[in-house]
Structures are given as structure tokens and as C-alpha cells.
Image (tube, rainbow, N blue to C red):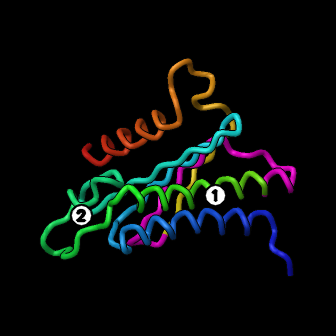
Amino acid sequence: MSKVFEDIFSELQADMVSICLEYVHKRAEKIYIYCSFEERVISSDFFYFINGRLVKKHKLNDALDDSYGLLYDISVERQKGVLNIINDDIEKIYRLCDEHKREMPTEIKLVYDVTKNRLKAEYKYELVYSNDPVKTADDIAKEWFEQIKEEHSA
């Protein structure tokens, strides 16, 4: 039996989650992954909820207490490696959508609850930043981080 569009789409999202899980050695409560594809420009970012704190990928060690033991490898090379895999997956989603004559999301927000093994995904299909004179995909990812930060502090 051949895989259908939805199966492959889900596998690519699962791959993004998997590489982000690997980055933190499965030691996170939640993973947040931002994917953008507008005007054929791919962008992504990811951040975590660890030990009761929301932290960006380069600040993981700030969320650790003595019970965690080892520090995370947050080197630029490692961060780029994860982003490259996520971006490759976005490219594959684009090709999949094109091949199946489906609309490509301009934005995908994934939230993976590690403790519950549950993935929540939100998709947008309209332009998010391309029609703004100054905003970039990075700005939107930062805004999402700040929004989640406010939700956790409320």
C-alpha cells in the first residue's frame, strides 16, 4: 500500500520533532518549532519549555538545575545542523504539496508535548510577513516566542 499525502506530511513533521528532541537529549517538557515558506523563502526556528522555563535553543543551559547533570551542546554548528534538517523538511513538504496539487502552508507552528507524546500543529496559508515592509520570518518566530512566554507567565 502506497503512502498518501497526509502520511508523508505527518512523517516530515515528525522528523522535525525528532531532530529537536535529539538536540535536547529528550530532556524537555515541550518543543516549539516554527516553519515559514513565503515567496519561496524557507525559514525556521525552534525553542523549548524545560524545567518550568521557556528558553531559546542557544539558552538551554539556563533552564537546567542540578538534577539534569550534563549541559547541552548548544554550539552554533549544532544549532545550524538542526535548522538545516528542519529547512530540508520544509522543502520536502513544498515538493510534496506541489506533487499532490495541494496548497503549501506559508506558516507551520508545531508544539510537541514530550510528556504526553502529543503534537499540535497550526497552519496558515496567507502571507504572514512578506507583505510587511520591515518584518521577516525571524521577527514572526520571535513574536511567537514572546507570546508563548506570556502564556506561561500568566
Decide if residue 144 is on the left or right side of residue 105: left
Q: Is residue 12 visible?
A: yes
Quadrant hosting residue 73: bottom left
Q: For label 1, count other residues whose C-alpha is less than 10 Å away and answer few (under 14), some (14-19) or many (20+).
A: some
Tag 1: amino acid: Asp
Res. 124 in view: no
Task: Provide residue 107's location: percent of width, then percent of height.
Answer: 61, 43
First in residue order: circle 2 vs circle 1 = 2
Reply yes or no: does residue 111 show up in magenta. yes
- Reply above or below: 117 against 103: below
Q: Where does the magenta region start and end?
A: 96-117
Q: Position of residue 143 (x, y in %)?
A: 41, 35
Q: Amino acid at mark 2?
A: Asn
Residue 16 picture quarter:
bottom right
Alpha-carbon span between mark 2 and mark 1: 30 Å
- The x, y position of residue 84, in whole percent, is 55, 57
Seen from this angle, which residue lies furthest top? 133
Quarter of the figure with the C terminus: top left
SS category of the residue bearing label 1:
helix
Residue lying at 69% horizontally and 53% vertically, measured from the top left: 91
Residue 61 drawn at (x, y percent)? 23, 61
Asked if residue 149 lies left or right of residue 61, the reply is right
Q: Residue at x 45, y 33 (%)?
A: 139
What residue does disc 1 label?
A: 88
Circle 2 is placed at which residue position? 51
